[in-house]
Amino acid sequence: MPRSVVILGRPNVGKSTLFNRLAQRKIAIVDDTPGVTRDRKEVLAQIGGHEVLLVDTAGLEEAPPDTVAGRMRASSEAALRAADLVIFVVDVRAGLTPADRAFATWLRRANLPVLLVANKAEGRGGAAAAMETYELGLGDPIAISAEHNEGVGVLHEAVAEALGEAPEDDGEPVEDDPERPLRLAIVGRPNAGKSTLLNALLGEERMITGPEPGLTRDSIAVEWRDATGGRVRLVDTAGMRKKARIEERLEQMSVAATLGALKEAEVVILVVDALLGMDEQDLRIARLAEREGRAVVIAFNKWDAVEDRAAARQKLDDVLTASLAQLRGVPVVTLSAQTGRGLDRLMPAVRATYALWNKRISTGELNRWFEAALTRHPPPAVDGRRVKLRYATMPKARPPTIAVFGTRAEELPEEYRRYLVNAFREAFAMPGVPIRMQMRGTR
Ligand code: GDP
Ligand code: GDP
Protein backbone atom coordinates (compact mmCIF):
# COMPACT_ATOMS: atom_id res chain seq x y z
CA MET A 1 0.00 0.00 0.00
CA PRO A 2 1.38 3.42 -0.89
CA ARG A 3 2.14 5.67 2.02
CA SER A 4 -0.16 8.54 2.69
CA VAL A 5 0.82 12.15 2.75
CA VAL A 6 -1.86 14.42 4.13
CA ILE A 7 -1.99 18.16 3.49
CA LEU A 8 -3.33 20.06 6.46
CA GLY A 9 -3.87 23.71 7.28
CA ARG A 10 -6.58 26.22 8.02
CA PRO A 11 -8.74 27.43 5.14
CA ASN A 12 -7.19 29.61 2.49
CA VAL A 13 -3.54 28.97 3.18
CA GLY A 14 -3.16 27.32 -0.23
CA LYS A 15 -3.68 23.62 0.44
CA SER A 16 -5.61 22.98 -2.73
CA THR A 17 -3.13 24.94 -4.79
CA LEU A 18 -0.31 22.88 -3.33
CA PHE A 19 -2.26 19.67 -3.77
CA ASN A 20 -2.77 20.41 -7.46
CA ARG A 21 0.88 21.27 -7.78
CA LEU A 22 2.04 18.03 -6.20
CA ALA A 23 -0.61 16.02 -7.98
CA GLN A 24 0.80 17.02 -11.32
CA ARG A 25 2.84 13.91 -11.20
CA LYS A 26 -0.27 11.96 -10.54
CA ILE A 27 -0.67 8.33 -11.24
CA ALA A 28 -4.38 8.08 -10.81
CA ILE A 29 -7.29 10.00 -9.52
CA VAL A 30 -8.76 8.01 -6.74
CA ASP A 31 -11.60 10.00 -5.44
CA ASP A 32 -14.09 12.20 -7.04
CA THR A 33 -17.00 13.86 -5.37
CA PRO A 34 -19.06 15.67 -7.93
CA GLY A 35 -20.68 18.91 -6.92
CA VAL A 36 -17.93 19.99 -4.60
CA THR A 37 -15.66 22.76 -5.80
CA ARG A 38 -12.60 20.96 -4.64
CA ASP A 39 -13.69 17.71 -6.04
CA ARG A 40 -10.43 15.83 -5.97
CA LYS A 41 -9.14 15.14 -2.54
CA GLU A 42 -7.09 12.03 -3.01
CA VAL A 43 -4.69 11.12 -5.68
CA LEU A 44 -1.92 8.61 -6.17
CA ALA A 45 1.10 10.65 -7.03
CA GLN A 46 4.83 10.42 -7.44
CA ILE A 47 6.59 12.61 -4.92
CA GLY A 48 10.32 12.55 -4.50
CA GLY A 49 10.54 9.09 -6.00
CA HIS A 50 7.83 7.73 -3.77
CA GLU A 51 4.45 6.59 -4.82
CA VAL A 52 2.16 8.22 -2.32
CA LEU A 53 -1.48 8.64 -1.65
CA LEU A 54 -1.80 12.38 -1.46
CA VAL A 55 -4.74 13.61 0.59
CA ASP A 56 -6.04 17.14 0.64
CA THR A 57 -8.06 18.02 3.70
CA ALA A 58 -9.27 21.29 2.18
CA GLY A 59 -12.94 21.77 2.72
CA LEU A 60 -13.01 19.25 5.51
CA GLU A 61 -12.41 21.89 8.12
CA GLU A 62 -15.21 24.20 7.18
CA ALA A 63 -16.86 24.15 10.59
CA PRO A 64 -16.15 27.50 12.25
CA PRO A 65 -15.74 26.52 15.92
CA ASP A 66 -12.32 27.56 17.05
CA THR A 67 -11.39 24.24 18.51
CA VAL A 68 -9.17 21.93 16.59
CA ALA A 69 -11.66 19.16 16.96
CA GLY A 70 -14.33 21.31 15.43
CA ARG A 71 -12.16 22.17 12.52
CA MET A 72 -11.35 18.67 11.66
CA ARG A 73 -14.16 16.49 10.68
CA ALA A 74 -13.84 12.92 11.82
CA SER A 75 -12.73 11.63 8.46
CA SER A 76 -10.06 14.24 8.23
CA GLU A 77 -8.77 13.34 11.61
CA ALA A 78 -8.75 9.66 10.74
CA ALA A 79 -6.77 10.43 7.61
CA LEU A 80 -4.34 12.37 9.72
CA ARG A 81 -3.86 9.68 12.28
CA ALA A 82 -3.15 7.19 9.53
CA ALA A 83 -0.78 9.55 7.75
CA ASP A 84 2.79 8.58 7.12
CA LEU A 85 3.56 12.23 6.72
CA VAL A 86 1.65 15.47 7.27
CA ILE A 87 2.37 18.54 5.19
CA PHE A 88 1.24 21.35 7.42
CA VAL A 89 0.67 24.53 5.43
CA VAL A 90 0.66 28.06 6.80
CA ASP A 91 0.26 31.36 4.94
CA VAL A 92 3.18 33.71 5.52
CA ARG A 93 1.35 36.65 3.98
CA ALA A 94 -1.44 36.43 6.49
CA GLY A 95 0.93 35.55 9.31
CA LEU A 96 0.27 32.99 11.99
CA THR A 97 -3.24 32.85 13.37
CA PRO A 98 -4.66 31.15 16.47
CA ALA A 99 -5.97 28.42 14.20
CA ASP A 100 -2.45 27.73 12.89
CA ARG A 101 -1.15 27.50 16.42
CA ALA A 102 -3.96 25.20 17.46
CA PHE A 103 -3.21 22.84 14.57
CA ALA A 104 0.49 22.92 15.39
CA THR A 105 -0.14 22.03 19.01
CA TRP A 106 -2.39 19.19 17.97
CA LEU A 107 0.22 17.89 15.55
CA ARG A 108 2.98 17.99 18.13
CA ARG A 109 0.85 16.12 20.62
CA ALA A 110 -0.19 13.53 18.06
CA ASN A 111 3.51 12.99 17.44
CA LEU A 112 3.03 12.70 13.71
CA PRO A 113 5.86 13.22 11.25
CA VAL A 114 5.30 16.75 9.97
CA LEU A 115 6.79 18.94 7.30
CA LEU A 116 6.08 22.59 7.96
CA VAL A 117 5.40 24.45 4.74
CA ALA A 118 5.42 28.25 4.69
CA ASN A 119 3.33 29.04 1.65
CA LYS A 120 2.88 32.26 -0.30
CA ALA A 121 6.55 32.99 0.31
CA GLU A 122 7.20 34.16 -3.23
CA GLY A 123 9.19 37.26 -4.01
CA ARG A 124 11.08 39.56 -1.77
CA GLY A 125 10.63 39.03 1.91
CA GLY A 126 9.06 35.63 1.45
CA ALA A 127 11.89 33.67 3.03
CA ALA A 128 12.19 36.13 5.86
CA ALA A 129 8.50 35.92 6.57
CA ALA A 130 8.82 32.15 6.67
CA MET A 131 11.19 32.48 9.63
CA GLU A 132 8.31 33.56 11.78
CA THR A 133 6.87 30.09 11.58
CA TYR A 134 9.75 28.54 13.56
CA GLU A 135 7.84 29.38 16.67
CA LEU A 136 5.30 26.67 15.88
CA GLY A 137 7.87 24.19 17.11
CA LEU A 138 7.59 21.97 14.05
CA GLY A 139 11.13 22.31 12.83
CA ASP A 140 12.54 24.14 9.83
CA PRO A 141 9.90 25.65 7.61
CA ILE A 142 10.12 24.99 3.90
CA ALA A 143 9.38 28.26 2.16
CA ILE A 144 7.42 27.78 -1.03
CA SER A 145 4.98 29.41 -3.33
CA ALA A 146 2.46 26.86 -4.45
CA GLU A 147 0.95 29.30 -6.88
CA HIS A 148 4.20 30.39 -8.48
CA ASN A 149 5.80 26.99 -8.24
CA GLU A 150 8.73 28.10 -6.13
CA GLY A 151 10.42 25.83 -3.64
CA VAL A 152 8.30 22.87 -4.68
CA GLY A 153 11.38 20.93 -5.73
CA VAL A 154 12.81 21.36 -2.24
CA LEU A 155 9.52 20.13 -0.83
CA HIS A 156 9.71 17.04 -3.04
CA GLU A 157 13.15 16.29 -1.65
CA ALA A 158 12.00 16.87 1.91
CA VAL A 159 9.10 14.47 1.42
CA ALA A 160 11.43 11.84 0.02
CA GLU A 161 13.75 12.27 2.96
CA ALA A 162 10.93 12.14 5.49
CA LEU A 163 9.56 8.94 3.99
CA GLY A 164 12.98 7.37 3.91
CA GLU A 165 14.07 4.84 1.39
CA ALA A 166 11.46 3.87 -1.14
CA PRO A 167 9.81 0.86 0.44
CA GLU A 168 10.39 -2.58 -0.93
CA ASP A 169 7.16 -4.24 -1.76
CA ASP A 170 6.13 -6.79 0.78
CA GLY A 171 6.23 -9.63 -1.70
CA GLU A 172 9.16 -11.86 -2.27
CA PRO A 173 11.81 -10.08 -4.24
CA VAL A 174 11.78 -11.00 -7.89
CA GLU A 175 15.16 -12.37 -8.63
CA ASP A 176 16.04 -12.04 -12.23
CA ASP A 177 19.21 -14.01 -11.83
CA PRO A 178 19.10 -16.27 -14.88
CA GLU A 179 21.06 -18.87 -12.98
CA ARG A 180 18.41 -19.22 -10.35
CA PRO A 181 16.58 -22.42 -11.15
CA LEU A 182 12.87 -22.36 -11.76
CA ARG A 183 11.25 -24.55 -9.15
CA LEU A 184 9.03 -27.02 -10.88
CA ALA A 185 6.64 -29.65 -9.62
CA ILE A 186 5.27 -32.42 -11.79
CA VAL A 187 2.02 -33.62 -10.35
CA GLY A 188 -0.88 -35.75 -11.43
CA ARG A 189 -2.72 -38.92 -10.81
CA PRO A 190 -0.83 -42.17 -10.50
CA ASN A 191 -0.06 -43.54 -13.94
CA ALA A 192 -0.62 -40.29 -15.79
CA GLY A 193 2.97 -40.45 -16.99
CA LYS A 194 4.85 -38.20 -14.59
CA SER A 195 7.96 -40.34 -14.33
CA THR A 196 8.05 -40.93 -18.06
CA LEU A 197 7.75 -37.21 -18.61
CA LEU A 198 10.52 -36.38 -16.21
CA ASN A 199 12.78 -38.92 -17.85
CA ALA A 200 12.02 -37.43 -21.22
CA LEU A 201 12.75 -33.93 -19.95
CA LEU A 202 16.00 -35.04 -18.46
CA GLY A 203 16.88 -36.74 -21.68
CA GLU A 204 18.30 -39.66 -19.85
CA GLU A 205 17.13 -42.40 -17.62
CA ARG A 206 17.95 -40.69 -14.40
CA MET A 207 14.57 -41.43 -12.98
CA ILE A 208 13.39 -44.95 -12.79
CA THR A 209 9.95 -45.70 -14.13
CA GLY A 210 8.03 -48.77 -13.40
CA PRO A 211 7.74 -50.71 -10.17
CA GLU A 212 10.90 -51.40 -8.28
CA PRO A 213 10.48 -52.78 -4.82
CA GLY A 214 11.94 -50.92 -1.90
CA LEU A 215 12.73 -47.80 -3.79
CA THR A 216 12.37 -44.57 -1.88
CA ARG A 217 12.29 -41.39 -3.81
CA ASP A 218 11.42 -39.06 -1.03
CA SER A 219 14.59 -37.10 -1.18
CA ILE A 220 15.19 -36.97 -4.86
CA ALA A 221 16.61 -33.71 -6.12
CA VAL A 222 16.89 -33.24 -9.82
CA GLU A 223 18.15 -30.18 -11.56
CA TRP A 224 18.72 -29.69 -15.25
CA ARG A 225 19.03 -27.15 -18.01
CA ASP A 226 16.04 -27.04 -20.29
CA ALA A 227 15.97 -26.31 -24.01
CA THR A 228 15.61 -22.59 -23.34
CA GLY A 229 18.95 -22.72 -21.52
CA GLY A 230 17.46 -21.94 -18.14
CA ARG A 231 17.89 -24.04 -15.08
CA VAL A 232 15.06 -26.07 -13.67
CA ARG A 233 14.83 -27.82 -10.37
CA LEU A 234 12.29 -30.45 -9.67
CA VAL A 235 11.16 -29.63 -6.18
CA ASP A 236 9.41 -32.80 -5.30
CA THR A 237 8.44 -36.07 -6.70
CA ALA A 238 5.05 -36.27 -5.12
CA GLY A 239 3.09 -39.06 -6.62
CA MET A 240 6.26 -40.60 -7.89
CA ARG A 241 7.16 -41.78 -4.46
CA LYS A 242 6.92 -45.29 -3.23
CA LYS A 243 5.58 -46.24 -6.55
CA ALA A 244 7.17 -49.55 -5.90
CA ARG A 245 4.00 -50.65 -4.28
CA ILE A 246 1.93 -51.62 -7.25
CA GLU A 247 -1.29 -51.21 -5.36
CA GLU A 248 -0.66 -47.54 -4.85
CA ARG A 249 -1.03 -46.98 -8.53
CA LEU A 250 -4.64 -47.90 -8.09
CA GLU A 251 -5.11 -45.71 -5.08
CA GLN A 252 -6.12 -42.13 -5.12
CA MET A 253 -3.24 -39.75 -5.32
CA SER A 254 -2.09 -38.50 -2.02
CA VAL A 255 -3.33 -34.97 -1.42
CA ALA A 256 -0.75 -34.38 1.27
CA ALA A 257 2.15 -35.32 -0.96
CA THR A 258 0.85 -33.22 -3.81
CA LEU A 259 0.38 -30.28 -1.51
CA GLY A 260 3.96 -30.59 -0.33
CA ALA A 261 5.18 -30.34 -3.90
CA LEU A 262 2.90 -27.43 -4.69
CA LYS A 263 4.09 -25.40 -1.75
CA GLU A 264 7.68 -25.61 -2.88
CA ALA A 265 7.06 -25.05 -6.54
CA GLU A 266 6.71 -21.95 -8.63
CA VAL A 267 5.24 -23.62 -11.66
CA VAL A 268 3.31 -26.84 -11.66
CA ILE A 269 3.04 -29.21 -14.58
CA LEU A 270 -0.18 -31.11 -14.15
CA VAL A 271 0.13 -34.31 -16.13
CA VAL A 272 -3.24 -35.51 -17.36
CA ASP A 273 -3.77 -38.83 -19.07
CA ALA A 274 -5.40 -37.88 -22.36
CA LEU A 275 -6.79 -41.38 -22.75
CA LEU A 276 -8.85 -40.87 -19.62
CA GLY A 277 -9.44 -37.14 -19.91
CA MET A 278 -9.45 -34.61 -17.15
CA ASP A 279 -11.42 -35.98 -14.25
CA GLU A 280 -12.35 -34.91 -10.73
CA GLN A 281 -8.97 -35.92 -9.33
CA ASP A 282 -7.12 -33.85 -11.89
CA LEU A 283 -9.38 -30.91 -11.20
CA ARG A 284 -8.76 -31.27 -7.51
CA ILE A 285 -5.00 -31.06 -8.06
CA ALA A 286 -5.42 -28.04 -10.32
CA ARG A 287 -7.56 -26.29 -7.72
CA LEU A 288 -5.00 -27.06 -5.04
CA ALA A 289 -2.33 -25.51 -7.23
CA GLU A 290 -4.49 -22.45 -7.74
CA ARG A 291 -5.17 -22.23 -4.04
CA GLU A 292 -1.45 -22.32 -3.36
CA GLY A 293 -0.99 -19.56 -5.88
CA ARG A 294 1.06 -21.58 -8.33
CA ALA A 295 1.23 -21.11 -12.06
CA VAL A 296 -0.09 -24.16 -13.87
CA VAL A 297 0.59 -25.79 -17.21
CA ILE A 298 -1.32 -28.87 -18.24
CA ALA A 299 0.61 -31.61 -20.02
CA PHE A 300 -2.05 -33.57 -21.86
CA ASN A 301 -0.07 -36.75 -22.08
CA LYS A 302 -0.28 -39.97 -24.08
CA TRP A 303 -1.42 -37.95 -27.06
CA ASP A 304 0.15 -40.63 -29.28
CA ALA A 305 -2.43 -43.10 -28.16
CA VAL A 306 -5.48 -40.88 -28.53
CA GLU A 307 -7.63 -41.83 -31.49
CA ASP A 308 -10.05 -38.94 -31.80
CA ARG A 309 -7.86 -35.98 -30.95
CA ALA A 310 -10.37 -33.30 -31.84
CA ALA A 311 -12.95 -34.84 -29.53
CA ALA A 312 -10.44 -35.31 -26.71
CA ARG A 313 -9.30 -31.73 -26.96
CA GLN A 314 -12.86 -30.40 -27.11
CA LYS A 315 -13.80 -32.41 -24.07
CA LEU A 316 -10.82 -31.06 -22.17
CA ASP A 317 -11.68 -27.48 -23.06
CA ASP A 318 -15.27 -28.04 -21.95
CA VAL A 319 -14.18 -29.40 -18.59
CA LEU A 320 -11.73 -26.55 -18.06
CA THR A 321 -14.30 -23.92 -18.93
CA ALA A 322 -16.97 -25.47 -16.77
CA SER A 323 -14.89 -26.45 -13.78
CA LEU A 324 -11.69 -24.47 -13.62
CA ALA A 325 -12.68 -20.84 -14.02
CA GLN A 326 -10.05 -19.82 -11.45
CA LEU A 327 -7.34 -20.71 -13.93
CA ARG A 328 -9.07 -19.48 -17.04
CA GLY A 329 -6.99 -19.98 -20.14
CA VAL A 330 -4.55 -22.36 -18.47
CA PRO A 331 -2.01 -23.44 -21.12
CA VAL A 332 -2.43 -26.97 -22.40
CA VAL A 333 0.39 -28.78 -24.15
CA THR A 334 -0.57 -31.98 -25.91
CA LEU A 335 2.34 -34.34 -25.96
CA SER A 336 3.65 -37.82 -25.66
CA ALA A 337 6.16 -38.31 -22.91
CA GLN A 338 6.88 -41.72 -24.34
CA THR A 339 7.65 -40.79 -27.94
CA GLY A 340 8.84 -37.29 -27.12
CA ARG A 341 6.39 -35.77 -29.58
CA GLY A 342 5.30 -32.27 -28.54
CA LEU A 343 7.73 -32.24 -25.66
CA ASP A 344 9.64 -29.27 -27.07
CA ARG A 345 6.59 -27.07 -26.46
CA LEU A 346 6.36 -27.88 -22.79
CA MET A 347 9.22 -25.92 -21.22
CA PRO A 348 8.60 -22.79 -23.30
CA ALA A 349 5.01 -22.87 -22.04
CA VAL A 350 6.30 -23.28 -18.50
CA ARG A 351 8.68 -20.34 -18.93
CA ALA A 352 5.98 -18.12 -20.41
CA THR A 353 3.59 -18.85 -17.57
CA TYR A 354 6.36 -18.31 -15.07
CA ALA A 355 7.07 -14.89 -16.56
CA LEU A 356 3.42 -13.89 -16.19
CA TRP A 357 3.33 -15.19 -12.66
CA ASN A 358 6.30 -12.94 -11.87
CA LYS A 359 5.04 -9.96 -13.77
CA ARG A 360 4.71 -6.59 -12.11
CA ILE A 361 2.37 -3.95 -13.31
CA SER A 362 3.02 -0.32 -12.49
CA THR A 363 0.49 1.43 -10.30
CA GLY A 364 -0.21 3.86 -13.12
CA GLU A 365 -0.98 1.16 -15.64
CA LEU A 366 -2.97 -0.74 -13.07
CA ASN A 367 -5.14 2.24 -12.20
CA ARG A 368 -5.79 3.15 -15.80
CA TRP A 369 -7.15 -0.35 -16.21
CA PHE A 370 -8.99 -0.08 -12.88
CA GLU A 371 -10.79 3.12 -13.78
CA ALA A 372 -11.82 1.70 -17.12
CA ALA A 373 -13.05 -1.50 -15.48
CA LEU A 374 -15.12 0.47 -12.97
CA THR A 375 -16.62 2.59 -15.72
CA ARG A 376 -17.54 -0.43 -17.77
CA HIS A 377 -19.16 -2.12 -14.83
CA PRO A 378 -19.60 0.03 -11.71
CA PRO A 379 -19.70 -1.72 -8.35
CA PRO A 380 -23.21 -2.55 -7.18
CA ALA A 381 -24.71 -0.86 -4.15
CA VAL A 382 -24.47 -2.77 -0.90
CA ASP A 383 -27.51 -2.52 1.36
CA GLY A 384 -28.73 0.30 -0.83
CA ARG A 385 -25.55 2.28 -0.36
CA ARG A 386 -23.08 3.18 -3.04
CA VAL A 387 -19.68 1.57 -2.80
CA LYS A 388 -16.88 3.80 -3.89
CA LEU A 389 -13.73 2.10 -5.07
CA ARG A 390 -10.77 4.41 -5.06
CA TYR A 391 -7.70 2.78 -6.45
CA ALA A 392 -5.76 -0.41 -6.83
CA THR A 393 -2.20 -1.38 -6.12
CA MET A 394 -0.15 -4.49 -6.74
CA PRO A 395 1.58 -5.22 -3.45
CA LYS A 396 3.24 -8.33 -4.79
CA ALA A 397 3.67 -10.73 -7.66
CA ARG A 398 4.27 -14.51 -7.55
CA PRO A 399 1.27 -14.81 -7.86
CA PRO A 400 -0.05 -11.46 -9.03
CA THR A 401 -1.81 -9.87 -6.09
CA ILE A 402 -4.03 -6.85 -6.41
CA ALA A 403 -5.34 -4.80 -3.52
CA VAL A 404 -8.44 -2.75 -4.19
CA PHE A 405 -9.15 0.12 -1.84
CA GLY A 406 -12.43 1.86 -1.29
CA THR A 407 -15.14 2.61 1.17
CA ARG A 408 -16.82 -0.68 2.11
CA ALA A 409 -14.90 -2.44 -0.62
CA GLU A 410 -14.81 -5.59 1.45
CA GLU A 411 -18.60 -5.74 1.48
CA LEU A 412 -18.91 -6.08 -2.27
CA PRO A 413 -20.39 -9.35 -3.46
CA GLU A 414 -18.04 -12.10 -4.60
CA GLU A 415 -19.34 -11.79 -8.17
CA TYR A 416 -18.00 -8.29 -8.41
CA ARG A 417 -14.60 -9.31 -7.15
CA ARG A 418 -14.64 -12.08 -9.73
CA TYR A 419 -15.56 -9.61 -12.43
CA LEU A 420 -12.50 -7.56 -11.52
CA VAL A 421 -10.24 -10.63 -11.45
CA ASN A 422 -11.39 -11.72 -14.88
CA ALA A 423 -11.16 -8.22 -16.30
CA PHE A 424 -7.63 -7.98 -14.93
CA ARG A 425 -6.67 -11.36 -16.32
CA GLU A 426 -7.95 -10.37 -19.72
CA ALA A 427 -6.45 -6.89 -19.76
CA PHE A 428 -3.01 -8.08 -18.76
CA ALA A 429 -3.17 -11.41 -20.59
CA MET A 430 -2.53 -13.75 -17.70
CA PRO A 431 -4.04 -17.08 -18.66
CA GLY A 432 -3.51 -19.90 -16.24
CA VAL A 433 -2.11 -17.68 -13.54
CA PRO A 434 -3.84 -17.51 -10.17
CA ILE A 435 -4.77 -13.95 -9.35
CA ARG A 436 -5.29 -12.70 -5.85
CA MET A 437 -7.55 -9.76 -5.33
CA GLN A 438 -8.03 -8.31 -1.89
CA MET A 439 -10.80 -5.84 -1.25
CA ARG A 440 -9.83 -3.42 1.47
CA GLY A 441 -12.24 -1.03 3.05
CA THR A 442 -10.90 2.38 3.90
CA ARG A 443 -12.12 4.56 6.69
P1 GDP B 1 -7.02 26.15 0.79
O1 GDP B 1 -8.30 26.70 1.29
O2 GDP B 1 -6.02 26.00 1.87
O3 GDP B 1 -7.18 24.92 -0.04
O4 GDP B 1 -6.39 27.28 -0.17
P2 GDP B 1 -6.42 27.46 -1.74
O5 GDP B 1 -5.46 26.55 -2.39
O6 GDP B 1 -7.82 27.42 -2.22
O7 GDP B 1 -5.79 28.92 -1.86
C1 GDP B 1 -6.38 30.02 -1.22
C2 GDP B 1 -5.95 31.28 -1.94
O8 GDP B 1 -4.56 31.48 -1.81
C3 GDP B 1 -6.25 31.25 -3.42
O9 GDP B 1 -6.72 32.50 -3.83
C4 GDP B 1 -4.89 30.94 -4.03
O10 GDP B 1 -4.80 31.47 -5.33
C5 GDP B 1 -3.95 31.63 -3.09
N1 GDP B 1 -2.63 31.04 -3.06
C6 GDP B 1 -2.30 29.73 -3.00
N2 GDP B 1 -0.96 29.57 -3.00
C7 GDP B 1 -0.43 30.80 -3.09
C8 GDP B 1 0.92 31.30 -3.15
O11 GDP B 1 1.90 30.57 -3.16
N3 GDP B 1 1.08 32.65 -3.19
C9 GDP B 1 0.02 33.50 -3.20
N4 GDP B 1 0.27 34.77 -3.25
N5 GDP B 1 -1.25 33.05 -3.17
C10 GDP B 1 -1.47 31.73 -3.11
P1 GDP C 1 3.36 -41.92 -13.17
O1 GDP C 1 2.71 -42.86 -12.23
O2 GDP C 1 2.52 -40.71 -13.35
O3 GDP C 1 4.75 -41.59 -12.84
O4 GDP C 1 3.32 -42.64 -14.61
P2 GDP C 1 4.50 -43.40 -15.38
O5 GDP C 1 5.44 -42.43 -15.96
O6 GDP C 1 5.02 -44.48 -14.55
O7 GDP C 1 3.65 -43.97 -16.59
C1 GDP C 1 2.52 -44.80 -16.37
C2 GDP C 1 2.29 -45.64 -17.61
O8 GDP C 1 1.90 -44.82 -18.72
C3 GDP C 1 3.54 -46.39 -18.04
O9 GDP C 1 3.14 -47.69 -18.46
C4 GDP C 1 4.04 -45.58 -19.21
O10 GDP C 1 4.71 -46.36 -20.14
C5 GDP C 1 2.75 -45.04 -19.81
N1 GDP C 1 2.98 -43.79 -20.53
C6 GDP C 1 3.61 -42.68 -20.03
N2 GDP C 1 3.65 -41.70 -20.96
C7 GDP C 1 3.05 -42.20 -22.07
C8 GDP C 1 2.77 -41.66 -23.38
O11 GDP C 1 3.11 -40.52 -23.72
N3 GDP C 1 2.09 -42.45 -24.23
C9 GDP C 1 1.70 -43.69 -23.91
N4 GDP C 1 1.03 -44.37 -24.81
N5 GDP C 1 1.93 -44.22 -22.70
C10 GDP C 1 2.60 -43.51 -21.79
Image: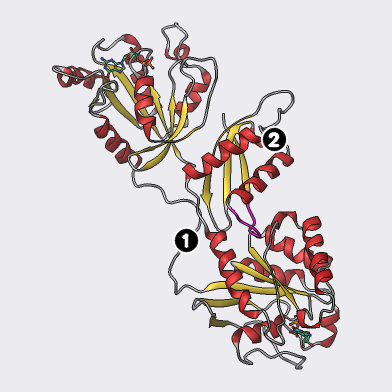
Residue shown at 56%/42% (left/top)? Answer: 369
Depth check: give the residue in front, 168 or 31. 31
The answer to which of marks 1 and 2 sits earlier in the sequence is 1
Q: Which residues are magenta?
A: 429-436
Residue pointed to by mark 1: 174
Rendered location of residue 189, percent (x, y): 78, 75
Q: Is residue 140 left or right of residue 28?
A: left
Q: Main secondary structure of the magenta part?
A: loop
Give the answer, above or below, for where 320 lies relative to 154. Answer: below
Secondary structure beneath disc 2? loop
- The secondary element bearing badge 1 is classed as loop
Q: Is residue 421 above or below residue 384?
A: below
Q: Ligand 1 is in which quadrant of the figure?
A: top left
Q: Position of residue 294 (x, y in %)?
A: 63, 62
Q: Amino acid at mark 2?
A: Leu
Q: Quadrant of the C terminus?
A: top right
Quickly name the residue at label 2.
412
Residue 364 picture location, percent across and down: 47, 42
Residue drawn where x is 69% and y is 35% of the image: 412
Q: CA distance from mark 1 to mark 2?
A: 32 Å
Q: Is residue 219 left or right of residue 212?
A: left
Which image quadrant is residue 297 in? bottom right
Residue at 41% from the left image edge and 7% from the top image edge = 66
Q: Within the magenta stretch, is there residue 259?
A: no
Q: Residues within 10 Å of mark 2 (few under 14, many from 20)?
A: some
Verify CB contact (< 8 Å) between mark 1 and mark 2. Answer: no
Q: Nearer the viewer, residue 302 or 60?
A: 302
Query: Where, by quadrant of the figure, is residue 195 drawn?
Result: bottom right
